[in-house]
Image (cartoon, rainbow, N blue to C red):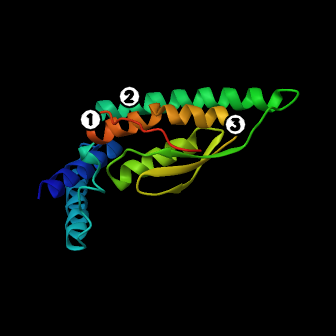
């Protein structure tokens, strides 16, 4: 029941922020629309903890976004250096990194974060690992250090997970 209530509050809050209207008719239509969406979602039995974003700590999520944007900028600079280097010293590598996230949503966030950083692409996700294609071997070595993995685990559970070394 608390998931339905929090979903309603999130939807109604978004409606209020996007409309920025104080007209009682618009506010009541927004509340009615939000309630209708929650009722339909409840009847379809699709409101669950896994797909519900409220369990993420907003401060950890904000910190994760800052870290991810920093990694994207850093990777962009590294890829630009590689492309403009006279010998173009790329060494394409396929590697497997450990995914310590406990939920499917956490693993998807981690795999998408890897793909968002230039020079790496997530190819396949399974229960405990992610296959990644790296433009250079150094990029795979950076992933094996597990910094990005720890940040995703931290927003998911609030604690760090130890990173186990994996084979290339």
**Residue 129 position within the rendered picture, expressed as x and y whole percent measured from the top left:** 47, 50
If you read the primary sequence from the N terminus, does the residue marked by circle 3 or circle 1 appear first? 3
> Which element is circle 3 on?
loop
Asked if 71 appears above or below 20 in the picture, the reply is above
| Disc 2 versus disc 1: nearer the observer | 1
Query: Which residue is disc 2 drawn over?
Result: 63
**Residue 15 position within the rendered picture, expressed as x and y whole percent measured from the top left:** 30, 49
- Image point 24% across, 58% down: which residue? 34
Total marks in image: 3
Asked if 112 appears above or below 87 in the picture, the reply is below
If you read the primary sequence from the N terminus, does the residue marked by circle 2 or circle 1 appear first? 2
- Image point 22% across, 54% down: which residue? 7
Task: Say which quarter of the image contains residue 154.
Answer: top left
Q: CA distance from mark 2 to mark 1?
A: 12 Å
Q: Which mark is residue 136?
A: 3
Q: Is mark 3 in CB contact (under 8 Å) with mark 1?
A: no
If you read the primary sequence from the N terminus, does the residue marked by circle 3 or circle 2 appear first? 2
116 left or right of 12? right
Q: Nearer the viewer, residue 157 or 1?
A: 157
Q: Which mark is residue 158?
A: 1
| Disc 3 versus disc 1: nearer the observer | 3
Mark 3 surroundings: few (<14), some (14-19) or many (≥20) residues within 10 A: some
């Amino acid at each position: 029941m608390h998931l339905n209530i929090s979903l309603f509050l999130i939807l109604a809050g978004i409606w209020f922020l996007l409309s920025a209207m104080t007209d009682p008719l618009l506010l009541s239509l927004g509340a009615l629309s939000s309630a209708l969406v929650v009722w339909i979602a409840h009847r379809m039995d699709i409101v669950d903890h896994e797909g519900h974003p409220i369990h993420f700590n907003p401060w950890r999520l904000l910190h994760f976004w800052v870290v991810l944007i920093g990694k994207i900028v850093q990777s962009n600079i590294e890829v630009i250096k590689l492309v403009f280097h006279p010998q173009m010293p790329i060494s394409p590598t396929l590697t497997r990194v450990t995914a310590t996230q406990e939920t499917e949503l956490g693993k998807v966030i981690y795999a998408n974060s890897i793909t968002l950083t230039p020079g790496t692409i997530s190819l396949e996700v399974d229960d405990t690992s992610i296959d990644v294609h790296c433009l250079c071997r150094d990029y795979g070595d950076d992933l094996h250090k597990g910094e990005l993995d720890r940040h995703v685990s931290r927003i998911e559970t609030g604690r760090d997970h130890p990173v186990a070394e994996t084979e290339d």
